[in-house]
Image (spheres, rainbow, N blue to C red):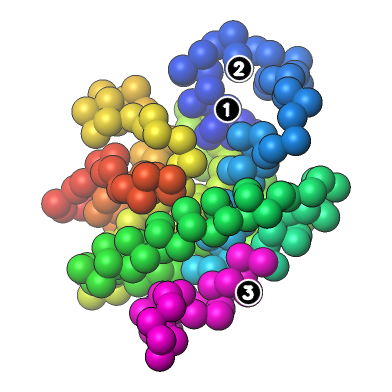
Amino acid sequence: ATSVRALTQYQSCPFGFLLKECFNLEPRQRDAEGLTPLEEGEWLHAFLWRYYSMKKDDDPVILSSRDPQGRGISDPFDRLFDDTAAEMQKRWDKKIFESERRYYRRLLKHFVEVEAIWHEEDTYVRSHFEWSFGAVPKEARDPRSVEEGLRFLGGGLKLHGKVDRIDIDPASKTFRVIDYKTGQSVPSAKEVQQGKGFQLTVYAMAVEELLLKDYWPQEACYYLVKAAERKRAFSLTER
């Protein structure tokens, strides 16, 4: 089985694909005290999974409840942030400095506040978080993850991957695929249409075929966590 991310790596940089996927080589990290880009991405993704999967859409948005003095985000956010930071620190065996904590706390607070506004403007329901297909981790985060992969070329190519988030609209039987990005560079809608950025297209195909067979993908979006922006990869008006 081949991961969707590996294929996108091959498309953007064949030599990088050779080093990472064939020779199992990783970029050399500088011996710095701060977080590496990989650690940063892991931390932010872990928090967003924990935050959204815990509350889903059954309860009011956590961010909407402020204390009587208007001091901002309520206790659940802070508790989840601290729990995730402690988990990452233990996993990495590495100290997270207080300055880093303050920076990422502010960053994530701003992102989830902005995302709450986006969410109030449409009819989608936050439904699946880190859904895996084709190669399910031992501790899969979404209980509906499937061992079956997405097959191409008459079954000769089997793809596996993990979708950060899937929102659904039960009324229209549509869904939205979301990919969190900690960087700023993502494929444009034109590049996705031309096949130059196919990651979310393949994810949408996997969701439709392996998870939500009665639904169809209305759109796919990149959520840029640091910039608190969203960029649409594709949008469909009919099945």
Between 127 and 104, the one nearer to me in the picture: 104
Would you say residue 66 sits in the magenta stretch? yes
Query: From the viewer's perspective, is 112 left or right of 25?
Result: left
Task: Point out the stretch of residues depicted in magenta.
Answer: 53-82
| Whole-number angstrom distance, CA of label 3 to CA of label 1 | 35 Å
Question: Counting other residues with Cα less than 10 Å from the Cα at mark 1, is it few (<14), some (14-19), or many (20 or more)?
Answer: many
Q: Which residue is mark 3?
A: 79
| Residue 6 numbered mark, or none | 1
Q: Earlier in the sequence, mark 1 or mark 2?
A: 1
Closest to the camera, between mark 3 and mark 2, is 3
* Residue at 54% across, 11% down: 14
Q: Quadrant of the N terminus?
A: top right
Question: Tag 1 or tag 3, which sits nearer the N-term?
Answer: 1
Q: Does the residue at mark 3 contact the one at mark 2 (Cβ under 8 Å)?
A: no
Query: Residue 118: x percent and y percent?
Result: 27, 63
Looking at the image, residue 135 sits to the left or right of residue 31; the answer is left
